[in-house]
Amino acid sequence: MVWIWIGWVLVLTFGIVVFRGAPYVPSRRRYIKQAFTDLYPLNSKDVLVDVGSGDGIVLRIASEYGTKAIGLELNPVLVLISRLLSRRDKNVQVKLVDFWLTPLPDNTTVVYAFMVTRDIKKITKKMQAEANRLGRSLAFITYGNRLPGREYNNALVGYALYTFVPLQIS
Ligand SMILES: C[S@@+](CC[C@H](N)C(=O)[O-])C[C@H]1O[C@@H](n2cnc3c(N)ncnc32)[C@H](O)[C@@H]1O
């Protein structure tokens, strides 16, 4: 009986999330490292936000570079798992939130997103709005998708790096 309940909890938590963003598929460790070394060299002054942080693999690798890493994750099971896996890592923090409804932390320097194509226009708008709100540039790393009509600074395997510059709104 308890297994049936656990099964339902998993189906519901993993299932409902797909209405708000990408389903859980982790990025590959080797490629993340390549991205943080060759695409956007992370350092200890960076604050990285992973929008939809899954099991926290991206956060833990970012932390290896001395970077503060913040995960925004909607699935409570994944939040629990990522907090457990990162429990000894002082640089890693995971918040149980819907990233569409959550402003980026004010000290964010770089955002990592592994999303479905459906959400690419929406995240482009959000990134621009956040750069405008913060009044400074934000680096944006996408995995698996490119932003239509926008030039990237650099690209590597499935990754592309963009810069969002604040726009003057009159
Ligand atoms: C493709 S996985 C990427 C996981 C991780 N970023 C990685 O690269 O390994 C997408 C993640 O986004 C989460 N997610 C989807 N929609 C979300 C939302 N609106 N707010 C927060 N997290 C969301 C999912 O639960 C899933 O863990």
Image (cartoon, rainbow, N blue to C red):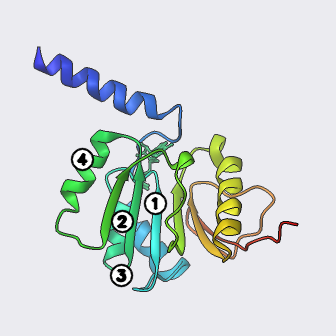
Residue at 24% in and 55% down: 83
Q: Which of marks 4 and 3 is in front?
A: 4
Marks 1/4: CA–CA distance: 16 Å
Question: Is the CB atom of the residue marked by disc 1 within 8 angstroms of ligand 1's nearest atom?
Answer: yes
Residue found at the far front of this picture: 170
At label 1, the amino acid type is: Asp
Residue that label 2 marks: 59
Residue 167, image x and y in percent?
79, 70
Residue 23, compared with residue 34, is above or below; it is above
Marks 4/3: CA–CA distance: 23 Å
Badge 1 density bin: few <14, some 14–19, many ≥20, Cα 10 Å: many
User: What is the quadrant of the N terminus in the image?
Assistant: top left
In front of the other: 28 or 165: 165
User: What is the quadrant of the C terminus in the image?
Assistant: bottom right
At label 4, the amino acid type is: Leu
Residue that label 1 marks: 50
Marks 1/2: CA–CA distance: 7 Å
Q: Which label was assigned to residue 65?
A: 3
